[in-house]
Amino acid sequence: MYPCGHCGRSHDTIAETRQCGEGSLPRAPTSDEARRRRRDRNTAREAAARQARSFSLDERTQQANDRRKNPTAHEAKLATALTSRGVTFKREYEFPENEIPWVADFYMSPKLVVEVDGDHEADWDAERDRQLRAHGRYVVLRYTNDEVEQHTAAVVEKIARYSGTEKCGTPGCGGVMQARWGRSSGWFLGCSNYEVGRNECRGRNAPCPRPNCDGELIEKFNRWGGKFQACTQYQSTGCSFKVDHKHTFLQPRGN
């Protein structure tokens, strides 16, 4: 078997690998639904890029101040629950990267972002998440208003596991497991002392962030060789959580 850098799969012969790179092997058929989804993603990408170019840093600061003074009921409820759990966070966080024009609902060190969503377009949220990964390797957990309202305890426990409340299992380490994003591995929990102490705490699979799901995130491939990260219970018990590995970069904004 010969691994193919074009589609991510392996082919039986070198000739097939070369043909795949040249585009002569058959590709997945494009259905009307696939075309519609592609158009929706492109629309969300263009809208996000337009906002990034027109959104000034002063406007971002003003928006953050306004939202701190007037949080939504669900954001206030989650903030109270996280404080009671002992999770340290920042409200309405302004990213240090100037290319990121948005304000995060909650931010936990080192690079964990939590968003409480109301009525948003799924493609718009997915585009924002891709851009946060591309510019700063942020891990973004999104919860709906209904999830915060109905499953507050479960949501808080998931956030706590991602935010560094779990101790590293390596004897004598003393670090905590924190959410991280790897360009090739996706989401995982890594020890806070991994790069500093050069120990062997490389990390382990991140838990599925969905409330009341005890699965873990693992790497998967679709039938056409595309790579994504999904819950171990993906589609088997109703859990639909998955993360796309693709990156999207914002267009540079003038000063």
Image: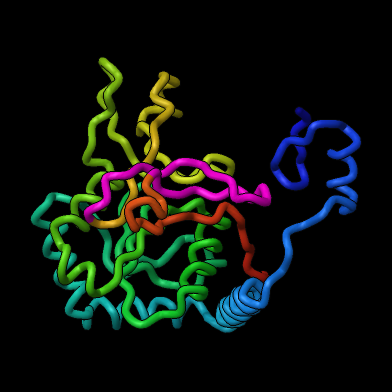
Q: Is residue 66 visible?
A: yes
Residue in the image at 54% along x and 69% along y = 127
User: In x, y percent, where is residue 142?
Assistant: 35, 64
Q: Nearer the viewer, residue 239 or 170?
A: 239
Residue in the image at 53% along x and 40% along y = 185
Q: Is residue 98 above or below residue 7?
A: below
- Magenta region, residue range: 212-232
User: In x, y percent, where is residue 46?
Assistant: 64, 79
Q: Nearer the viewer, residue 178 or 15?
A: 15
Name the colouring of the figure. rainbow
User: In x, y percent, where is residue 159?
Assistant: 26, 52
Residue in the image at 52% along x and 80% along y = 56
Q: Is residue 206 above or below residue 142?
A: above
Q: Quadrant of the N terminus?
A: top right
Q: Is residue 111 visible?
A: no
Left or right, 56 with reference to 38: left
Quadrant of residue 105 within the rendered picture: bottom left
Quadrant of residue 240 within the rendered picture: bottom left
Residue in the image at 59% along x and 81% along y = 47
Q: Is residue 20 above or below residue 168?
A: below
Q: Nearer the viewer, residue 246 or 23?
A: 23
Quadrant of residue 16 within the rendered picture: top right
Left or right, 48 with reference to 72: right
Whether residue 215 appears in magenta in the rendering, the answer is: yes
User: In x, y percent, where is residue 176?
Assistant: 28, 33
Left or right, 146 with reference to 2: left
Whether residue 104 appears in magenta in the rendering, the answer is: no
